[in-house]
Amino acid sequence: MQQTQRRKNIRVFKLIFSVILMFSISVGFYIFNQYQKIENDEMKRINDKHSQRLTFSTDKLAAVIEGVDDIIKKLTTSPQIMKFTEHPSQSSRDTLENMFYFVAKNEAIYSQIRYINNDGIELIRVNNLGVQPLRVPTAQLQNKSQRPYFVYAKQLKQGEVGTWPVDLEIENGELSQPIQASMRIISPVYHQQKRQGFMVINLSISNMLSAIDGIHQDNVVTKIFEHQGHLLASDQPNETLDNLLHNKAGSSLAELMPNLWKQIQSSENGRLTQDDAVYSYARLSLGEAYSPLGQYIVISSPTDSPYVQQQKQHLLVNGLLILLLIAGICGYIFKLYNQHENELANSQLIEAAFNGVAGVIITNPQFALIKVNQEFVRVSGYTQKQLLNKSLYQLNLSLNEHQVAAIKIQLEKDDLWKGEIVGHNKSGLQYTLITRIQTLKNNIGQVKKYVITFIDITQRKLLEEELRNQSESDPLTGVWNRRKFDKELDNLTVYTKRYPDYQACLGIIDIDHFKVINDKHGHDAGDVALQKLAHFLNQQCRETDIVARIGGEEFAVLMPHTSAAQAEAVLNRLCRIIDANSQFPFTISAGVTKVKDDATLAYKHADIAMYRAKKAGRNQVIQYDATTTSNTQMRMTSSSKLSVV
C-alpha cells in the first residue's frame, strides 16, 4: 500500500515538474527576445543620433571655417588697419584695438587677435580666455620674431591666408594659463603695395568644438584627428591637452584602435561597433589652408545608455522573480515529498544514527536529555547516568541567548538546524562539533522530540589553527612573516580611517652591511644575526606591537596607540642598544612614519625614510613627515655613533 502511494506521488511530482519546466523555458525565451529587442532599438537610436550629429558638426565646422576666413580677410583690409599702418597714432591704435575687442566678444572661438609688425613685435593684442575679452597693455606685448609660426608668416604673399598646426599657446616662453590649445590663422597686411605686418588670429580648439557640437547629449564624445590618426581636438579638454603636452608613442588612433583606423582609411564615412562602444566617423573637407584643423571627425558613445541599462535590469529582475516563484513552487513540492519520505524513515534513521560513528543526543521538547550514545559520553567526559535528564544548557556549550533563540526560530521554521557548536568537557577542555538538530513531531504537529547528531572536529580545528600560525610566521626567525604583516597593516589602516584621532606608527628596520656579514662570515652567520635581531625586537617591543620579517634583512614593527615622536624614540633606543652591545656584530638603520588610511603609502613612506637613513650614513633613524610632499622635509635623528660595519 505504501509503495503504491509513493509511486503515485512520484508520478504527480514528475507531471507538475514537467509543466513548470516548460513554463520556465517559455519565460526564458520571452526574456531573451525582449533583451535582443532592447539592444536592437538602442543601436538604431544610436545610429540615428550619430548621423544627425555628424551632419550638424561637419556643416557647422564648414560654416565656422568660412567665417574665420572671411573675418581675417576683412581685418587685413579694413580701413582701421590701413589708417593705423599709415598713421600709428594712439587714436588709430585705439580704434583698431576696439575692433579686435568686439570681434573677440562676438566670436568666442577666437582666443587671441593680434597685429604684429614686420619685426615680430606685437603692436596690438586682445586676449579672449575668460568671460570677457581683455585688451593687453602695451607693456605686456611681446616679441614673437623667434617663434616658428612668425618665420612661416613671412613666407606668405599678399592676400594669402596661412595656418599653423594646432599647438599650445605660449606666453613669455611658458605655457599660458589657463593652458589653451589653438590653431593660428595668419595673413600679411599690405598698404600701398608694401607689407606692413601680420594679422594673427588664434582659433581656440575647445571653443571651436563647443561651437560645432551644438547637439549636446550625454555619453557622446566628439574628437577630431589629423591625417596620421593623432588627436587634435576633443570635447573632453583634458584629453586634448594631455595629447599635446606629452605626445606619447603608441597614442595614435592607428595604434590604439587599428580596426577603426583601417575602416576610416577605406571610406569617407561609416560606423563601427567595438569594445561596448559605437564609433561613427566622416572625412572633413576643409581645404588646403585649413587642413591642419583635422582630417577626420569621430563620434563615439557606449552601446548601453543608462535608460537601456535600466530597461535591461528591470527585464532581468522580472525574469528573476518569475524564476524564483517557479523555484519556490518546486521547493514546496520537494518539501512535501521529503516530508513524506522522512515520515516513513524516521524510526530507521534514528536506529541507524545510534549504530553509526556519529554522536547522538535525543531530548524532550524542553531540551532535557533522554538518551545519548557512547560518542557523546566520550566527548563530554560525563557518564550516561550523569547526562540523562540534564538540560542541554547545562553542558557548558558556548551558546548565548541570541544564538539559542536563533536556533529555536530555525527549528520552528524548518524543523532542522545545522551548524558548529563549541563546548567544554568535564575537564574544561574545549571541543568543536558539527551539529544537526532535527525536530520530531506527532500527527497534530506538536514537537515530540529533538534528535541531535554531531561529528567531533576538535582535532581538525586544532590542526587548522596550527597550520594558520605556521603560514603566518617566518621559519628562520620565528617572528611574523610578510603575509601576516600585510594583514595587520591593512587592519590598522582601517582602524585609523575609522578613528581619525587614533595614532599608530610603522617602523622598517634594516641590518647595515648585511651582505658583508654573509660574504665575510658565511650565510650561517647571517642567519644568526637575523635570529638575534628578531629575538631582540620581540623582547623590546610591547605585546600589542607586531614584529615581522618582511624581506631578506628587513624587519617591520607596527606600533598601535603610538605617536610619531614615541615611535621615533623607541627605534632610537633600539638603535642605541644594538650599537652599544657587542653581542650584535652589526648596526641597524630604520625609517618610521605615521599609519593613516593608506597601507601602501605608509609602507612606502617608512621604506623611503629607511633608505634615507642608509644614505645618510646608517646606524640612525629617520622619521617621514607624511603631512608634506617633499622628502627634504623628513626629520633625521642619529644614534650616538656611526656604524663601523
Image (cartoon, grey):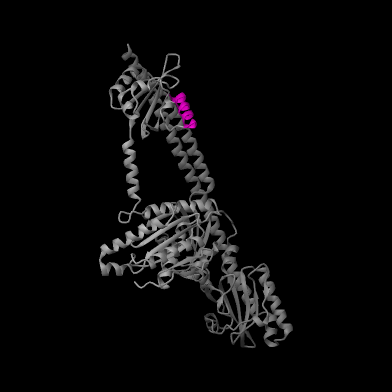
Q: Nearer the viewer, residue 472 or 518?
A: 518
Q: Residue furthest top?
A: 1
For image coordinates 51% across by 39% down, the residue present is 314
Along the horizontal axis of the image, is 309 left or right of 74?
A: left
Q: Point out residue 12 in the picture as x, y percentages from the top left corner.
A: 37, 19
On screen, residue 595 above or below 333: below
State the image quarter where residue 137 is shown: bottom right
Above or below: residue 61 compared with residue 151 = above
Question: Image quarter for residue 534?
Answer: bottom left
- Residue 583 visible in the displayed image: yes
User: Which of the image's four quarters has the C terminus?
Assistant: bottom left
In the image, the segment drawn in magenta is: 400-415
Pick out the residue farthest to the right.
91
Relative to residue 104, is residue 639 drawn left or right? left
User: Residue 290 location in percent, x, y?
Assistant: 53, 72
| Residue depicted at 27% across the width and 69% down the height | 519
Q: Magenta stretch: residue 357 in it?
A: no
Instruction: Tell me residue 615's x, y (percent).
Output: 41, 72
Query: In the displayed structure, does residue 643 sit left or right of residue 525?
Result: right
- Residue found 45% across the figure and 65% down from its top: 572
Q: Dividing the image into 4 quarters, which one contains the N terminus? A: top left
Question: x, y percentage for residue 544?
Answer: 45, 52
